[in-house]
Amino acid sequence: QVQLVESGGGLVQAGGSLRLSCVASGRTFSSYVMGWFRQAPEKEREFVAAISRMSVSTDYANSVKGRFTISRDNAKNTVYLQMKSLKPEDTAVYYCAASSRRYTPKVWDEYNYWGQGTQVTVSS
């Protein structure tokens, strides 16, 4: 069992930056691929970014490529999402998730564990 707790969300103006963090419980953090998803009101949950177990590979949604950076610190059981040049359309609840897959999934149902989410609001 893995428990995930996100933090770092908030209200920011367009063009601003935020860094989300997700701390995982347990001693097996490095055995999971980690991902970030987001869900805006009345929209489906969508993939944002994912990172492999040893940070060898990352994957991003086209909508955030070049603006967001995913990273992880296995010693701290933490995955991060650095968000820059934020846009109003980035407004959503952001979730971190852990997957036991050997690749970086982009589909939510390939992730085994989820955090409770953190709200990000970007004002215009």
Image (cartoon, rainbow, N blue to C red):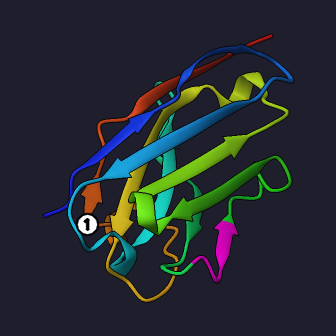
Is residue 30 located in the magenta-colored stretch of the structure?
no
What secondary structure is marked by label 1? Answer: loop
Asked if 55 appears above or below 42 in the picture, the reply is below
The residue shown at (65%, 80%) is 57
The residue shown at (38%, 35%) is 117
As drawn, which residue projects farthest toward the left?
1
* Residue 40 pos. (x, y %): 52, 30
* Residue 34 pos. (x, y %): 45, 65
Nearer to us in this view, 85 or 74: 74
Determine whether, in the image, residue 63 is placed left or right of residue 94: right
* Residue 72 pos. (x, y %): 55, 62
The picture quadrant where one finds residue 66 is bottom right
The residue shown at (52%, 77%) is 104
Asked if 80 appears above or below 122 in the picture, the reply is below
Q: Magenta part of the protein: which range?
A: 55-59
Indicate the amino acid at tag 1. Asn
Determine whether, in the image, residue 82 is placed left or right of residue 110: right
* Residue pointed to by mark 1: 112
The residue shown at (25%, 66%) is 112
Q: Residues within 10 Å of mark 1 (few under 14, many from 20)?
A: some
The picture quadrant where one finds residue 19 is top right
Q: How many marks?
A: 1
Question: Looking at the magenta stretch, what is its main secondary structure?
Answer: loop
Asked if 66 appears above or below 92 in the picture, the reply is below
Determine whether, in the image, residue 19 is placed left or right of residue 39: right
Nearer to us in this view, 72 or 61: 72
* Residue 108 pos. (x, y %): 40, 61
Quarter the N terminus occupies? bottom left
Quarter the C terminus occupies? top right
As drawn, which residue projects farthest toward the bottom?
102
